[in-house]
Image: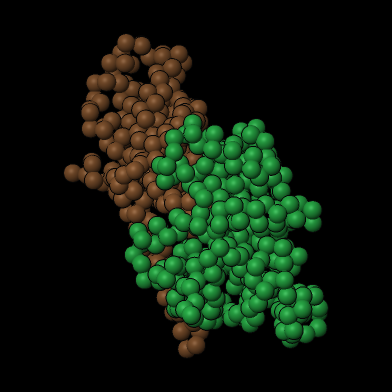
Chain colours: A green, B brown
Amino acid sequence: MNRPTPKIRIRGLTKSFGEKRVLDGVDLDVPAGTSLVVIGGSGAGKSVLLKCLLGLVEPDGGTIEIDGRNLLALNAGARRAVVARIGMLFQNGALFDSLPVWENVAFGLLARRQIRRAEARARASEILGQLGLAASVGEHYPAELSGGMQKRVALARAIAATPEMLFFDEPTTGLDPIMAAVIDGLIIDCVKRLGSTAIAITHDIASARRIGDSAAMLHEGRIVWNGPAACLLESGDPLVDQFTHGRREGPIRMELCA
Amino acid sequence: MNLLLGVLAAVGRSALNVCRTIGSLALFALVGLSHVVRPPFPVRRFITALVGMAYFSLPVVALTAIFTGMVLALQSYTGFARFAAQGAVASVVVLSMTRELGPVLAGLMVAGRVGAATAAEIGTMRVTDQIDALSTLSTNPMKYLVAPRLLAGIIALPILVVVADILGVLGGFIVSTASLGFNRIAYLHNTFQYLQTMDVVSGLIKAAVFGFVIALMGCYNGYTSRGGAEGVGAATTAAVVSASILILAFDYVLTQLFFAR
């Protein structure tokens, strides 16, 4: 029986900055409607991988297929159309300081001219409500909100256009464990409700096990392990074991000097 | 020999860096300007930029112009008294203000105020991933952040220079009539006697060029900033310094173009 084409298929992806090879032949498959969590140490290339998928960084080689079409072979307009189907939650929210929360949430809808401003405000309130935020929050500016609220607003912005794919860059970084669990719960709800295909990158193993169907570990620019997220703590792989249990001793050597 | 090669290599690297920066700046300007004429144009962002650049710069430009006009009248009077040529004060004030001091001083003031703010705002957006976020939300950052500011700069500076010209002449008029003993009617008559349309128009063209330069340097340095708060600080300084030097350089080039016989 033929296996269905994965929603996202990455093959041999490479990227170097100067002499530093950050991605060294990454291979990954993400089936439609599932969530993949990519774990790995600082500087392993996780954020670069997401930026390559979003077209923010041009890879040196390899392919990125979305629904079977190689993103890197498309012209700029077609590539923009693919990226428009992706919602992205940035590590620090990346909310626009100069705009009120409601306009941040509805930014993508207004940019695509899918909606008028009055409708956009109502739609933003509705999405904020789904994420447990009062409509009055929409009138505030991002700087007036706590870290947890900013993350929720950033999540609201990512899901506002009901994207087919959702990417999360360190969604729980800087949050206390309870707020991290709340954000994870919201992410799971959003992904399920929208039926999206999701990729999350994180250091947070508890978060990875909660939000991922499958997990992959990126080390020295390559995927060194791939399996169910529930098995992260019992993977049997020495690299993954050292990382997930936070052991100092093991095959991973951290660079302490620049 | 090694020392000589080292010096030559350093000079070569610097020259290549300068060429790379000029090329990158020229491309940035061309792409930014292309988004001014390619629809859709972000009108709301343009109005915000125009108000920030023109309206909120009015006090600082007005004060600079009026005091400059006053000092110019005083200095001209004391200088020309040596040759019994005090009658030329009104003409000197108006020609200096419209041709040179209005556009240059307004440009330098706006470079300090708006150029720095633009670089800091866009630089902060760069280092906090807001520019990447724009791209993921179907928005071209050059169209959203740069094009409205370039157009606002081209339009705002001539408006400010008209105000600066009027207030500079007013400053000279106040000092000349209140403390130097000039007759009001005679002073006004002398002011307009030798003033030609080209004097004012050349100043306004200079202002449009300076406005473009200020917006371009603010946007470019902010857009290309790297490395957190330190990078944003460096971008802000570079925006103000480069815009100020370019204003003075373009002032010479344009003056040569308009008035050299």
**In this view, which residue lies farthest toward the front?**
A1
User: What's the residue at 64%, 71% (across, down)?
Assistant: A214
Q: Is residue B171 above or below residue B147?
A: above
**In this view, which residue lies farthest toward the bottom?**
B1
Q: Is residue A94 visible?
A: no
Residue B228 screen position, x and y as percent: 61, 58
User: What's the residue at 46%, 15% (across, down)?
Assistant: B179
State the image quarter where residue B180 is shown. top left
Residue B195 falls left or right of residue A66: left
Residue A122 screen position, x and y as percent: 54, 34
Residue B156 screen position, x and y as percent: 39, 34
Residue B166 falls left or right of residue A220: left
Residue B196 vs residue A123, the one in the foreground: A123
Residue A171 falls left or right of residue B210: right
Residue A159 vs residue B89, the one in the foreground: A159
Residue A27 screen position, x and y as percent: 53, 79
Residue B209 vs residue B30, the one in the foreground: B30
Q: Is residue B43 above or below residue B183?
A: below
State the image quarter where residue B16 is shown. bottom left
User: What's the residue at 69%, 45% (across, down)?
Assistant: A149
Q: Is residue A243 above or below residue B138?
A: below
User: What's the residue at 64%, 43% (across, down)?
Assistant: A130
